[in-house]
Image: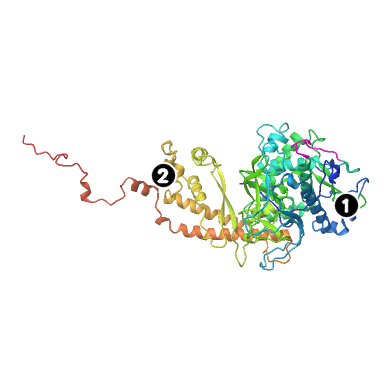
Amino acid sequence: MKINNSHHFFLLAGFGTISCLTNPTDGFSSSVSAGASSSRVRPAWTSERRRRVGTTTRTATALRDSAENDPIDNTQRLETLAKIANEALSSHGTEIFKPFHARVAVIPPSNDDDDDDYDVPRQFRRLGLIASEPVSKADQTIAAIPFYDSDGSGLALAPHLATKVVYKDVLPEGYDGWTGDIGLLAMLLLNEMARFHVDAATGDASPKGVSDLPRRKPPVQSLMNAYVAALPSHREMSELHPLLWNEEEQEILQSSSTKKIYRLLDDVDDDAAWLEETLWNADRRTFPETVSLRIRSPDGTDDDDDDDWIEERPCFSPEGFRYAVALVRSRSFFVDGSLRLLPFLDFANHGDFDSYEISGGGIGTLWGSAKGAFLKSGKALNVGEEVEISYGPKGPAEYLLDHGFVPGMCRHSRRGGSAITAELTFEVDDGDRFRDDKLDVLEYETYDLAPMDPSQSFDVVGGVGSTGAPDPAMIQFLRLVKLGGRDAFLLESIFRKEVWGFMSEPVSEENERDVVMGVIDACEKALEDMEGEDASDGNLSQNAKLCAMVRESERQALERTLIYMKQESEALDLKEYYQERRLKSLGLDSEWSREDDDVGWGGTRVPGGADYDW
């Protein structure tokens, strides 16, 4: 399924840089400015300017000189963002959360000493959640948020709000981009930023985007503003998320994994190009290329430069869309049948152990019960201890492409990981003489609610306890893909309702050999394409080391699968195939003997058995 979704990224789960509230007393405002490049080729982003309110320029000294050299590890900045978030939660949290027993906090860097040489230490500070009350047991609810799916008047964002509410009069009916639900959530997030654009010279609110949708009560809107304020900036995400890495690092990742980042980038850039040409360029007053966002600490003063600054971010442009997609991939959750952004809950960082995924359920309200999402603790916590959640069962490449990090459970190491996977992709050949029949089977006769495409990707698994046995669904799909020759009769219309079920078991020795060799060839090709240095190389950059982690984990999964399939290739004569199974079902599988000639005519009424005296 999708990314996603979903949640955070490598070291900075809760960085942010913007904020603006429509109510001046809240200490936020927002507005938009123009000037970002609209080129589809991502330039080195150098226009993230911070300007003092009321002046034309502002130097980086207000954020301390060290911030320019290390923009994603600025403690003072993070503390300001945490204050903004906590002030909003304290003032308005009860309006929406049922409950919220946590606070946003700056989580210090850590180096997991218990891990092995392949570990990348958490080198940067970032935001997370800490318990604000004692948690006495596991499975205790820390926070819950209702969806308000009908009109988006709450905080939670879902894809249908883009097509049915915010962009209802802008997007064509039936719009379905290459980025799917992730792209729709990205458009919603860009709109939230644009709604709170400020005039860069004065700091006064100058809303852009579809500025009146979704409609929210002022307290709820204040919470949304504070959330947007605490999101990582484009510059920070450029360091932390693969979609915004430089081209050299993306090329390393492309050759390090079977899950290709170039495919993702193509989808993002194609959608952005269409949106820019069709929608954004036609109305730049509504859809500005960049937005200016004012961040102001709730306890700051007008003369306190350290707690009040303006940041410029890309918005309705190819660069802004890629930035928003990276945010959505890193922070979204699949809950109650939909991918969603769940503000403030998504500040919780990932933990491999003693942690739960975000779950859905009913939330009691004054008006009855409403659907919502729950964040539950996986263990007892004292006040001030970090609240961690699980980002779900994903492989190393998925974690890196979604969140910008590789958790310990996905690493190939001396201790072994438990979630080590690689991806293999197979498809029905365009030149297959039976292609149309096979596509018909995939579309109508596989799974009632989920017709299969002619190209399918499957995970192969390594790690602790793995035998290398492939996914049965992959083998079933490949048997259909390889079906031909003397087995092609199974594609006749008389078998059309049954052929997919037939593929769940071996069809013929020839077909099974083609399937096994197909997997072997795919594994060998994937291993051959992987290039790069060992993760333990001390000269690698942090991002190159992350790529090496993915590469080594996937290699292990591919090698284990390769060993298993080579063993399968030597045991093909031991399997039972379609003809044997069919004969057995008809009772025709036993050996013939003379006694079997008695076909049961009964009595003396057998051919030639009468004794007539003519």
**Earlier-in-chain disc, 1 versus 2:** 1
Residue 555, compared with residue 154, is above or below; it is below
Residue 39, visible in the rendered structure: no
**Label ID, residue 486:** 2
| Closer to the camera in the image, 572 or 475 | 475
- Residue behind mark 1: 300
Per the image, is 517 magenta? no
Q: Disc 1 or disc 2, which is closer to the eye?
A: 1
Image coordinates for residue 444, horizontal then vertical, percent: 50, 37
The amino acid pointed to by label 2 is Arg
Residue at (40% x, 56% y) in the render:
573
**Label ID, residue 142:** none
Image coordinates for residue 167, horizontal then vertical, percent: 72, 35
Distance between the Cα atoms at labels 1 and 2? 79 Å
| Closer to the camera in the image, 527 or 344 | 344
Residue 376, visible in the rendered structure: yes
Which segment is the magenta one? 205-217
The amino acid pointed to by label 1 is Gly
